[in-house]
Image (cartoon, rainbow, N blue to C red):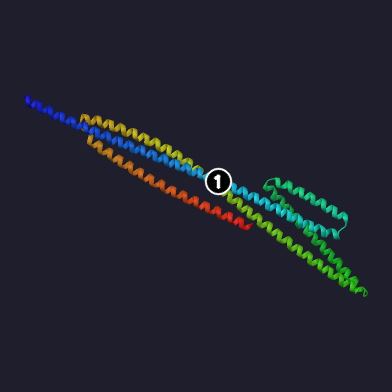
Amino acid sequence: MEKGWKEGRGGGEGVGGGGGEEEEEEEKEEEEEEEEEEEEEEEEEEEEEEEEEEEEEEEEEEEEEEEEEEEEGEEEEEEEEEEEEEEEEEEEDEEEEEEEEEEEEEEEEEEEEEDEEEEEEEEDEEEEEEEEEDEEEEEEEEEEEEEEEEDEEEEEEEEEDEEEEEEEEEDDDDDDDEEEEEEEEEEEEEEEEEEEEDEDDEVEEVEEEEEEEEEEEEEEEEEEEEEDEEKKRRRRRRRGKKKKRRREEEGRRRRRGRRRRRRRRGGRGGGGEEEEEEEKKRGEEEEEGRRGKKKKKKKKKKKRKTKRKKKKKKKKKKKKKRRRRR
């Protein structure tokens, strides 16, 4: 009896020892899983830092673009000043020609009108772009009316010249004077035709410049809309990541609770192996899900990079076009 009792006791101690080793292995597995989870969290934090760096780089690029636009605006202002100086020089030449032909009173009136026009232009430059466009259209209409009036005056002058020619033809003594007057009239008509052609060319240039400005404004609005959409996408991503972390933390808590329950049940005996298999399956499924998510993230990163490259190329092309137009 004593011998049997000792053997039974020894066998029990062996079983108990084996159970302690299993607990140590389970604890090691838990520690390894926790380390893997911590590594995944670190990787996610690194990815977030990379995204923040990318956002900072984009902001820096935007600032550089703004600086370039400011420089371009300064260059455009300088060009406008040069054009204004050239226009003033042309107006002065025209005034000198008119001084030779017109009386002193007409010259003074024209100078006053020119000063008023210059003051109006300076005031119009300070107003909004829409008002400028409306005023330019009104000025073009006024110029067309002036051209029509000039055409009517030219027609009247031509009629008067024809009448004078008829009268002069009746006088045989003034044949030489008539020929000289006709030559002068023909020269004046040629000069007027050349001036009209120059004015038509200027109108066409103004229309082309307005069309180019409208196209540039539309492109800038499209770029701003794309940037706003990109910011909204980033906010959604951040919210999704926060939700995902919460879910993962909840999953970890549940897993730890299952492991504790399993240990308790395993100590009592029965059902431990089935729970271990289920736990392994769940762990494998979760790992597969994590790998799939990582692949998706990499693909999204590549897409973002390609989009940025395309945007940069478009902006460079636009800048080249603007410089060529200048």
Q: Nearer the viewer, residue 309 or 246?
A: 309
Q: Is residue 181 above or below residue 12?
A: below
Q: Nearer the viewer, residue 193 or 10?
A: 10
Q: Position of residue 191 (x, y in %)?
A: 79, 65
Q: How many callouts does the rendering have? A: 1
* 19 with respect to 123 (left or right): left
Q: Nearer the viewer, residue 158 or 244?
A: 244
Name the residue tied to disc 1.
Answer: 62
Most extreme residue toward the top is 2
Q: Quadrant of the C terminus?
A: bottom right
Residue at horizontal 47%, vertical 49%? 305
* 1 with respect to 184 (left or right): left
* 18 with respect to 177 (left or right): left
Q: Is residue 35 above or below residue 105?
A: above
Q: Position of residue 237 (x, y in %)?
A: 45, 41
Q: Secondary structure at mark 1?
A: helix
Q: Quadrant of the N terminus?
A: top left
- Tell me which corner region of the image, top left, top right, bottom left or bottom right, holds residue 145: bottom right
Most extreme residue toward the bottom is 172
Residue at horizontal 61%, vertical 56%? 323
The amino acid type found where label 1 is placed reads Glu
Residue at horizontal 73%, vertical 62%? 198
Disc 1 residue crowd, few under 14, some 14–19, many 20+, Cα 10 Å:
few
Q: Position of residue 117 (x, y in %)?
A: 77, 50
